[in-house]
């Protein structure tokens, strides 16, 4: 298998514009995500599927910014997180609870929702914010036993969008299919020239075609073949392919800000004990070191919390 293969996200739309779809092969990015981690197989599968899903949703959004998709768990896995920016650059990581053991047949529920307290969180962070604007965040209970169901339920309840996802990931491959019914507002279509009944018919047909796709087939088949195989009887319009890729946005400055948030006392106690503070990026594994002088400089400059709040907005 070639490791230089470029990842591809292929958007398409049904001819009557009632349904839009996307197929993604994000295997190269997914292998980069795993390069510095050794996750148990069931965790790998969930994170690989989330990586594909984050890119699919991101490419579908009508806003310029990044999307952060998180599942906060209450079982052996405490967090799965995928970030995708406006240029479809992604990073992802998983955090296991201390001393956690993961059974080979573990599911999303046993890993992340063992006590019913798991949460699915989507954060949309626009690139250009007006001063004081907070990112939009949607938080819902984990509703479903696989990544696709959780996201489908979220999209329907929170965004009122009929969405279907088929996701598959293993050690080497991560692929997915998204279908979405274009929204009608008060009986009027946003972009659809057909009646609501016709649009619904197209949607139902598309979902039936999508549902013929089995997980193993998705793992074994390239998306250019899949698009033909699934929709050969339909008239669809295919757009120019997009190319997602791995990218970690960590910098020495951002890690420094994180240390400032921890507080001087905490950081100084680590220096007293170990002579320096060493931090590895959770996403890419990059190693950062701060000695006594570096830390003194960190705390000598302005408080990062204060710099995040515009003066006019600050309370007290
Ligand atoms: Zn990093």
Image (cartoon, grey):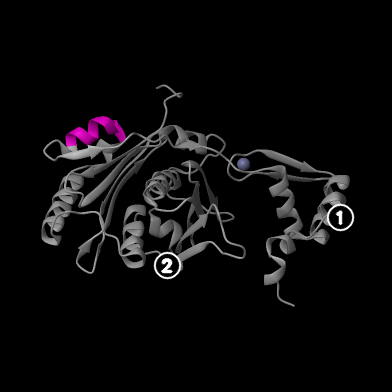
Q: Is residue 221 magenta?
A: yes
Q: Which mark is residue 211?
A: none
Percent position of residue 209, x then y: 16, 45
Q: Quadrant of residue 129?
A: bottom right
Callout 2 crowding tier (Cα within 10 Å): few <14, some 14–19, many ≥20: some
Q: Is residue 123 above or below residue 283?
A: below
Q: Which residue is mark 1?
A: 300
Q: Which mark is residue 140?
A: 2
Secondary structure under tag 2 reads strand
Give the side of residue 172 with respect to residue 250, left or right: left
User: Where ligand 1 lies, by image quadrant?
Assistant: top right
Percent position of residue 15, x then y: 17, 44
Mark 2 / mark 1, whichever is N-terminal = 2
Give the side of residue 105 with respect to residue 247, left or right: left
Which stretch is magenta?
219-229
> Is any atom of residue 124 visible in this view?
yes
The answer to whether the beta carbon of the residue marked 2 is less than 8 Å from any atom of ligand 1 is: no
Asked whether the beta carbons under mark 2 and mark 1 sit within 8 Å of each other, the answer is no
Callout 1 crowding tier (Cα within 10 Å): few <14, some 14–19, many ≥20: few
Q: Quadrant of residue 250?
A: top right
Percent position of residue 74, x then y: 49, 63
Q: Magenta span: helix, strand or loop, mainly? A: helix
Q: Is residue 276 above or below residue 184?
A: above
């Amino acid at each position: 298998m070639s490791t230089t293969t470029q990842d591809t996200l292929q958007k398409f739309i049904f001819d009557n514009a009632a349904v839009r779809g996307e197929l993604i092969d994000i295997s190269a990015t997914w292998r980069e995500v795993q390069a510095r981690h050794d996750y148990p197989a069931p965790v790998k599968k969930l994170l690989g599927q989330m990586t594909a899903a984050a890119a699919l949703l991101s490419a579908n959004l009508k806003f310029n910014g990044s999307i952060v998709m998180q599942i906060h768990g209450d079982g052996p896995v405490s967090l799965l997180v995928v970030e995708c920016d406006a240029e479809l650059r992604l990073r992802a990581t998983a955090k296991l609870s201390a001393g956690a053991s993961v059974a080979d047949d573990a599911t999303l529920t046993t890993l992340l929702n063992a006590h019913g307290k798991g949460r699915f969180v989507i954060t949309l962070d626009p690139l250009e914010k007006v001063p004081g604007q907070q990112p939009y965040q949607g938080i819902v209970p984990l509703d479903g036993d696989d990544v696709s169901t959780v996201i489908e339920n979220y999209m329907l309840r929170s965004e009122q969008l009929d969405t279907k996802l088929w996701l598959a990931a293993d050690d080497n491959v991560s692929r997915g299919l998204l279908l979405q019914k274009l929204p009608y507002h008060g009986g009027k279509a946003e972009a659809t020239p057909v009646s609501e009944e016709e649009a619904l018919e197209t949607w139902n047909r598309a979902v039936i075609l999508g549902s013929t796709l089995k997980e193993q087939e998705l793992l074994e088949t390239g998306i250019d073949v899949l698009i033909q195989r699934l929709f050969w009887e339909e008239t669809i319009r295919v757009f120019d392919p997009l190319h997602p890729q791995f990218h970690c946005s960590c910098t020495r400055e951002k890690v420094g800000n994180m240390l400032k948030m921890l507080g001087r006392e905490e950081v100084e106690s680590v220096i007293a004990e170990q002579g320096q503070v060493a931090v590895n990026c959770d996403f890419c594994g990059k190693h950062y070191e701060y000695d006594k002088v570096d830390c003194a400089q960190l705390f000598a400059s302005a408080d990062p919390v204060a710099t995040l709040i515009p003066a006019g907005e600050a309370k007290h």
